[in-house]
Amino acid sequence: MDRIKKLYVDAHGAIDALLKDADHEAFDLAAACVLANGREGDATAVVLVAPPSTSKTEMVNAFSGVKWTYEQTSMTAQTFVSGWKSGSSTDPSLLARLEKKGKTCLLNKEFTTVMEMRQSERDTVLAHIREVMDGSLSKDFGTGKTVSWSGKLGLLAAITPAIEIRWGAHTSLGARWVWVRIETPSDAESRVEIAIAAIESDDSAKVLRRELKDATTKWLESSRSVPSPGMSEKSKLYLAKLADRTAKGRTEIPKDKDGHPSGVKPEPEGTGRLARSFHRLAESLAILRGHAEINAEDLRAVTRAALDTAPVPRAKVYKAIAQRPLTIEEIVQKTSMSKSAVNRTLKDLEQVDLAVSEPVSTGQRGRPSEKWRVV
């Protein structure tokens, strides 16, 4: 494990050399996704979310040298399986080619383009990805040919926050998808410092990218055969409860034609697939960090990903009231959200059994109040 720890330090040093104020935990989660897809077990998908021209593309590119990864930026309804056949016996389907090459993790740094497709084509692509993540895909063609595939193929993708406006597409991707929102400075001073650092490293950026790619490749490929770390019963229970909260937290609330809650109780997705994804990420994080057992640091990173997987307003409000019960005014102050947005979000969390309000005394007659807490 000492060698893995050294390679971990080398990889993080390389990303620091290329990027100022890199989000190291997000980098670890991306690496954990790639490693999980290179080991035995179900496929795992992680989506890195950040504004354009930030670090998400550099992070995805860093893993392109790992021998079980494959870069695929363009995705259409014909990407995974193809009914076309040339004069040769070679199957042109991407899935068949990847299986032959031993590639089990796709890298896509432009997943936003999928979300910007026409709805019919986007729905087809997302349906194919969901089936691939589940381990099998079958498609009939007008020629009478049926193409079937079974195997393993995970995904590390990058996308802009525009995904928020297509939450329906987000939830249709499947239960194994986990989101990681890369932390990027928003204050003017930090943004200027990042721009200055980019200018100063302009001449050496190509070399720094190659060094990051080399360091990351050594780190991941050396970790692939490391025995699985131990996991306590306490950690197992924690991940199970985290999967339950996450499934509830990203559940869509049924709305009427005017966009108001319909009053119908929403039904969250099952917890099994999310739980397995969280376990795979926690296990891979422990391996990559040189831990003999999944520990609090690894669980903290997975918890961050779980919160990132929920809609931003829900995650903000949930984190605020998870610390202690708060009034609506206190939540507004803590989250910088409008009062109406906080009210809507609290009602959403209440609908999925993640938050509840309790009356509190204000000490003033006729001035009842309430505080919200997590369930």
Image (cartoon, helix red, strand yellow):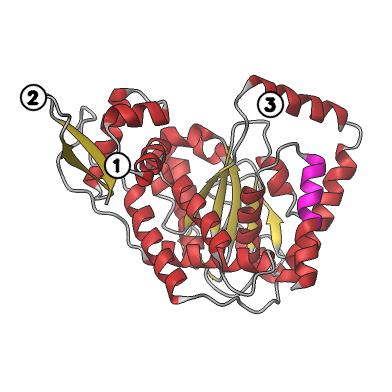
Residue at 50% over, 67% down:
279
Instruction: Identify the image quadrant of residue 241.
Output: bottom left
Q: Secondary structure at mark 2?
A: loop
Q: Read off the magenta span.
A: 10-18
Mark 2 and mark 3 lie on one chain; the one further toward the N terminus is: 3
Instruction: Identify the image quadrant of residue 367.
Output: top left
The amino acid on which the numbered mark 2 sits, given as a three-letter code, is Arg
Q: Secondary structure at mark 3?
A: helix
Q: Is residue 65 visible?
A: no
User: Could you classify mark 3 by the number of other residues whose Cα lies within 10 Å: few (under 14), some (14-19), or many (20 or more)?
Assistant: some
User: Could you classify mark 2 by the number of other residues whose Cα lies within 10 Å: few (under 14), some (14-19), or many (20 or more)?
Assistant: few
Mark 1 and mark 3 lie on one chain; the one further toward the N terminus is: 3
The image position of residue 288, as x and y in percent, is: 68, 65
| Residue 91 magenta-highlighted | no
Q: Nearer the viewer, residue 191 or 60?
A: 191
Residue at 57% over, 69% down:
283
The image position of residue 82, as x and y in percent, is: 58, 57
Give the Cα distance between marks 1 and 2.
Answer: 22 Å
Tag of residue 325:
1
The amino acid on which the numbered mark 3 sits, given as a three-letter code, is Ser
The image position of residue 176, as x and y in percent, is: 46, 59
Left/right of residue 149 with respect to residue 68 in the rendered view: left
Dominant secondary structure, magenta = helix
The residue pinned by badge 3 equals: 190
Instruction: Identify the image quadrant of residue 236.
Output: bottom left
**Vertical position of residue 104 compared to residue 308: above or below:** below
| Residue 13 magenta-highlighted | yes
The image position of residue 287, as x and y in percent, is: 65, 69
The residue pinned by badge 2 equals: 365
The amino acid on which the numbered mark 1 sits, given as a three-letter code, is Pro
